[in-house]
Every structure is written in structure tokens, then in C-alpha cells.
Amino acid sequence: MDQHRAGVVTSSRTDGVAVISFNRPHRHNAINDELDQAWQAEVNRAIGDETVRCVLLRGEGRSFCSGRDTAHLGERVAGESDLSFVRRAQETRLAMIEAPKTIVAAVRGYVLGGGLEIALSADMRVAAADSVFGFPEIKFGLVADTGGTQLLTPLIGPSKAKYLLLSGDRISADAAREWGLVDWVVEPDELDEAALDLAKRLAAAPPQAAAMTKQLVDQAWAGSIRNGIRQELIAQVALFAGAEHRAAKGAQLDLLRVKE
């Protein structure tokens, strides 16, 4: 097994599968700039690697990914604009959706916000029974901005999608399976083995036929999803600049400080 470590991200290759793991377990793999950049680079490297036929996404520790780290919410490095920041994240999400390789997400614990959008960008999702899913963005006066509104709706329908996105409530793994958000639910200690076994079976398919099959299935909504994600970009940039977001963000951060 070829293994590559990049601090906050780890990756390995086995039997045609690239296993990419978030590695900030002390923060439930919350995304800061370091993790974001390393993870995007690793995903793009796997997609471009001819020896890789399937990509498996997972997280170290108790959670898959709890979304953007609230300690860094709204921060931009070296004066980067909100437009550039969100668009860059969207490009990686679109690359996953349009990749010729099959992508599987193995999720556990917190699967929230941007972490849930990453899971939704995969072709299939295997969840541990302890997983919880939600979009907290609305509580910060924001929208899901890397495909959440567009990827969620075809899976669970518009009314349930609106409920999750508008309430900020969380649902269990069993509810997520019942709604169609995830495909399989397994015991937490079985997750890694079950997901890797699935990824290896998918990697064994003839690669050109697999790529064309994925493209044909996705053809029904590919164009509308790409357009909708760009609409998320416009909406999010406008919200970041508004007073509503600043007030909601302050209130939510105060609540988090109290809980800590």
C-alpha cells in the first residue's frame, strides 16, 4: 500500500482505490484554510492519477467533517475576496461531481455543513450508525454554497431539502437512509472495512465503461447542478456582505462560547 501523509490530510493507494482522510480529529475534522488547501490538492491529485479507479473519502477520529471551523469563519488569507474563496471550493466540488472516477464517502459522527456537501458530492455514501447530518449555515445568516442546495434536492425531494436547509436541524443516520441521503448504514466499527470493500469492488470495473456509466446517470441533472452551484456563489457573496450575516454570526459564536 502506497501511503502519503500531508499533516492535516492523509492518503493511501490500495487495489486501485485512493483513500483520502481528513486528519484534524481534535476538531471533528473542521475545515480551516490549511486543511482546505491540502484536501483540495489531494482530491485533484487522485482524480488525475491514472492508477486510481475509485476514490474513498473518510475522516480520522470520531467524525467525518463538521464543516467550516467556526474559529475561522469568514477569514480570508492575504485579502482573498469572498467570491474567489467560495468559487475555489466550488471548483473542487464540481471536479468531484464530474470526475470519471467513482467517489465513495464513508461518514461517521458529525457530517455538517461543508462536510455534508462533500459527502453529497460523492457518488455513494456509507454511514456509521452514529452519524448526524445537518446544514447549520442558516443559523449564521448564510446558505450552503458548495452544492448543498443542488445536490440534496434530487436525493430527498424539495420539501425535506428545504426543511434541512431552513431549520438547521440535524437528523440521524437511520433518518438519512430512510430519506435517501445515504445508501448504507453500518455499525461504527464496521464502517472502514465496509466502505473500502465497496470501493475495491467499484475499482474493479473496466474504467472507461465505469466513467461513461457515471456520466450517463448524471446527465439527467448535471447541467442544472452546475448552474445552481454558481447561483449559490452569487447568493453567498451577497450574504457575506450583509448586516444579517454579521448579526447572526455574532449571536451564534456567543452561543458556542457559552457551551464551551
Image (tube, grey):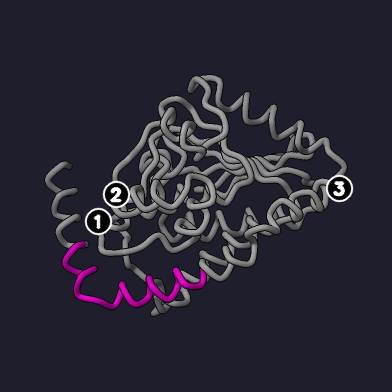
Q: Main secondary structure of the magenta part?
A: helix
Q: Name the residue type under label 1.
A: Lys
Q: CA distance from mark 1 to mark 3?
A: 43 Å
Would you say 80 lies left or right of 252 here? Answer: right
Residue in the image at 78% along x and 38% along y: 203
Determine contact: label 1, label 2, CB under 8 Å: yes
Q: In the rendered structure, which amino acid carries the disc numbered 2?
A: Gly
- Residue 146 in percent (x, y) is at 48, 61
The answer to whether 81 is drawn above or below residue 44 in the figure is below
Residue 245 within the magenta-colored segment of the rendering: yes
Question: Which portion, as a residue range, is magenta?
Answer: 229-248
The residue under label 1 is 139
Q: Which residue is mark 3?
A: 209
Of labels 1 and 3, earlier in sequence is 1
Crowding near pointer 1: few (<14 within 10 Å), some, many (20+)? some
Whether residue 128 sits left or right of residue 193 in the image: it is left
